[in-house]
Image: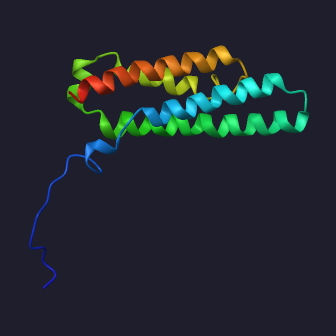
Amino acid sequence: MFTPKITVHAHCDLPCGIYDPSQAKIEAQSVKACMEKYAASSDPDFKARAVAIKEARSNMVKEHLWVLWTDYFKPNHFEAYPQLSALFNETTKLAGAAGTKGTNDVAVAEKLISKIDEIAEIFWATKK
């Protein structure tokens, strides 16, 4: 009675069409915008809110990247792009305490966005 009638197989959590590095980039752009608004304000309460939002968005960048790194990319991708693990490691660190979480330097956010673009280039190449 409770025995399945159909067996299904999947190679990832859901069809791979759900993954997209754009999510990480949007959050990284929000981080940069928070930094710019922080720099333009003299209101200490506003600055405190900008930092809190920037740190939360930095965490979201890391989460989106980790999902791509651990769920989307497969061994054959890492073989074809041997720099991929190091690129993810560097990019997630740029969104961490030594990166955008620990500074209000817009140049760091710009570097983070650039690294996400590198990941996106590889990602889209694997989708062809």
- Residue under the image location 41 percent in, 32 percent down: 21
If the image is split into quadrants, where does the N terminus sit?
bottom left
Q: Along the horizontal axis of the image, is 57 left or right of 36? A: left
- Position of residue 117 measured from the top left corner of the image (x, y, whole percent): 44, 20
Compared with 118, 28 (above or below) is: below
Which of 66 and 61 lies nearest the eye of the viewer? Answer: 61
- Position of residue 18 measured from the top left corner of the image (x, y, whole percent): 33, 45
In the image, farthest residue toward the right? 43
- Residue under the image location 76 percent in, 35 percent down: 50
Total marks placed: 0
If the image is split into quadrants, where does the C terminus sit?
top left
Instruction: Place residue 123 in its image quadrant.
Output: top left
Which of 62 and 23 lies nearest the eye of the viewer? Answer: 23
Instruction: Place residue 32 in its image quadrant.
Output: top right
- Residue under the image location 70 percent in, 26 percent down: 102
- Position of residue 88 measured from the top left corner of the image (x, y, whole percent): 43, 25
- Position of residue 12 measured from the top left corner of the image (x, y, whole percent): 26, 47
In the image, farthest residue toward the bottom? 1
- Residue under the image location 64 percent in, 30 percent down: 31
Instruction: Place residue 95 in its image quadrant.
Output: top right
**Which of the colour schemes (rainbow, by chain, secondary structure, one colour) is used?**
rainbow
